[in-house]
Amino acid sequence: MKLISIGSLFVIFLLTGSLNCDKEDYDNDFAEFEDFDTDDDFVKVAADRNEADRKGSGVDKSEGAALGGNGFAGEDAEDDGVVEDEDSEFDHFEDEEEFEGFNKDSSTPPVFDQKTGEPKLTVAKVPLHFGAHWKSYWMEMIAIAGLLAYFANYFVGRNKNSKIASLWLQTHRQLLEDNFAVIGDDTQKEREGPDGFIKESESVYTLWCSGRTCCEGMLVELKLIRRQDLVAIVSDLMKPSQDQLHIKIELSPEIMDPFVFCVASKRTASKFFKEMYDLSKFCILVNNPESKYNVPSGFAVLSEIPEASSAILDSRVSAMLSKYSHLIDYIYVSDQYNGAISQEDTSQQLKMPDVKSQLLLGFNLPKANDMESAKPLMVLVFYLLEKIKRYRLSKEGQQKADKNRARVEEEFMKSTHAARAEAAAQRREEKRKLEKERVMAEEDPEKQRRWEKKEQKRQQKRNQPKMKQLSVKAL
């Protein structure tokens, strides 16, 4: 116990001595400041000391200012002496790249809001997009003016075409009533236009006349300029067109002898010769028709039988062609009329096309105020109708016409031979198929066996090579 007490006292003695040494060192570190009682004296002594250090090191005031406020140039002085301002949330308004024309050195100070302390933004007064003057709407005005012009032209053109159709019918009504029992079509009352015309469109009017000998009826078609269409009016300035009258008379069967004939302006004759079936198959283009048939120089003649062409182009018709050459477009007579050549594959047709006897005429209409001058043209229509009714071919002409029709039929048969053979083979195959179904449906094995044997022989005979038999005359 005495040993433990002595050891404890020795440890306490050592600890007490170390604490006294630390206290003395701490008191010695602040011994030089014991004489200063106030903060002002401390600041004055620190300033004098900084001045003495500056003079001793040879650094002037300017260098000291550059190094820092307290004259120290070390890293610690830079960290302790420089105080950075905090970034403002409105610094981006002073970005020269963001705002063009921003002058950082401008003498005009920014305006701040007194309540919030934030910069006040001034919004420039930008005018509205839609101005109050008419120059802003020039495209709309042009579009509205175009629409108004189109609709105004539509109503004016439509009324003008209707007046032309009415004037033509008023001029020729008495002549039509003298030759036909019925003028107009009672079945088309809902489409009836001015004075009995059937209004197909704003520029096309048709009139059906019936009740006359030697013909089934007559179709009158007025194809007027599309005056209601402003675009068509503009195109007519570059390619002028005329009001036209087309007459189609369907002749009664056996009323005319077989021949095909056409006299027309050169442009129309060339078009018909390429497009019309009967003219391309039966007719030839006559060379020098002025001397052969006494027609004006602006006309061409397509003829099958020369004597029929001479009979149609008598002195009266030739005089009308010379006098009204500016109004007559074509005169077309045919017993083989089938319309235009079909653009489809004709090799698929198995029979000759249906043909009719037709008299077709085309005239150019004069101006509305001179409609009476076109009245002799309708007289020419009925003159030709009576002439075709009375005319008969000679024996040689009849033989030539028959030969031409046989030639055309033979050409058609040759061109459609493959199609007809294929159709015949298909019919035979269908017939055998029906026969097989009928035999197989019967419960007679013997009959089925005989039919199969017969079919086998037929197939063998069909597969055998064909041999030609030559006949040799005996010596």
Image (tube, grey):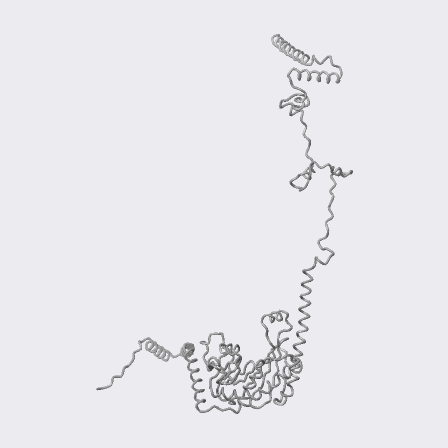
- Residue nearest the observer in this picture, 318 or 101: 318
Say which quarter of the image contains residue 363. Answer: bottom right
Image coords of residue 341 (percent x, y): 49, 77
Is residue 365 found left or right of 424 in the rendered image?
right
Q: Does any portion of residue 352 appear in the rendered image?
A: no
Q: Does any portion of residue 66 appear in the rendered image?
A: yes
Q: Quadrant of the C terminus?
A: bottom left
- Residue nearest the observer in this picture, 295 or 155: 295
The relative height of residue 240 versus residue 406 in the rendered view (above or below) is: above
Q: Quadrant of the N terminus?
A: top right
Image coords of residue 367 (percent x, y): 64, 79
Say which quarter of the image contains residue 24. Answer: top right
Image coords of residue 130 (percent x, y): 71, 55
Q: Find the residue positioned furthest to the right.
A: 114
Is residue 33 found left or right of 419 in the rendered image?
right
Image coords of residue 65 (percent x, y): 67, 23
- Residue nearest the observer in this picture, 74 or 374: 374
The relative height of residue 127 versus residue 106 in the rendered view (above or below) is: below
Is residue 40 found left or right of 271 in the rendered image?
right
